[in-house]
Amino acid sequence: VERSLVLVKPDGVQRQLTGTILARIEAKGYRIVELKLVEATREVLEKHYEEHVGKPFYEPLVEFMLSGPTVAAVLEGDRVIEGFRSLAGTTDPTTAAPGTIRGDFGRDWGEKVQKNLVHGSDSVESAEREIAIWFG
Ligand code: ATP
């Protein structure tokens, strides 16, 4: 069975959207097999976002992710990686399609970092890597 690492980022937790987001995941039919509320450390975030090191939004992104607790989950299901990314919507929440998590609840695109509520793994390889980072 395919697995995906999903995060409700600090903006989602702070706005009390965790339950709504998890409800959409469950309603779609994915199984939540791991779930925790964590204060991410810089060490975890540097590993998670290592592909973005050096980009202009990298440091603001890490700072944003350190600004409050994150909910980390492992989802299981057929084609869950693709399926969750479809539920989440495109990166920019302002133009993400209505009906998606980002499209329905997001708006903020900061000058330096976008607050787009959720993260979902983008491939089987990154899912395994990210699950190891967040859940050991
Ligand atoms: P998606 O791939 O669906 O866009 P993602 O979270 O995988 O979502 P990444 O490209 O991996 O997107 O970027 C990680 C995060 O960095 C984004 O979710 C967003 O918060 C931030 N980000 C990405 N690109 C930019 C950008 N051009 N300006 C500001 N922030 C950005």
Image (cartoon, rainbow, N blue to C red):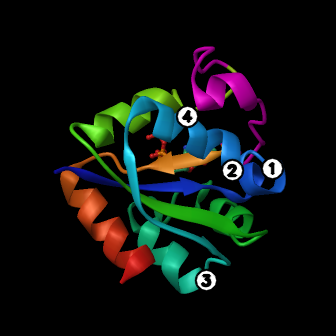
Q: Give the label on residue 41, or none.
A: 3
Instruction: Name the amino acid type tagged 1.
Output: Gln
Residue 77 appears at what percent x and percent y? 26, 44
Q: Residue furthest left?
A: 1
Give the answer, above or below, for where 8 lies relative to 21: below
Within-10-Å neighbours for mark 1: few <14, some 14–19, many 20+: few
Residue designated by label 1: 16
Q: Secondary structure at mark 4?
A: helix
Q: Residue furthest top?
A: 98
Instruction: Name the amino acid type tagged 2.
Output: Thr
Measure the alpha-carbon separation of dots 4 and 2.
Answer: 10 Å
Q: Secondary structure at mark 1?
A: loop
Is residue 108 in the magenta section? Answer: yes
In this view of the protein, which residue sits in the foreground, 80 or 114? 80
Residue designated by label 4: 24
Residue drawn 32% across the image and 76% down it: 132
Measure the alpha-carbon separation of dots 3 and 2.
Answer: 20 Å
Residue 99 appears at what percent x and percent y? 59, 17
Instruction: Name the amino acid type tagged 4.
Output: Arg
- Frontmost of labels 3 and 2 is 2
Quarter of the image with the C terminus is bottom left
Give the answer, above or below, for where 67 lies relative to 110: below
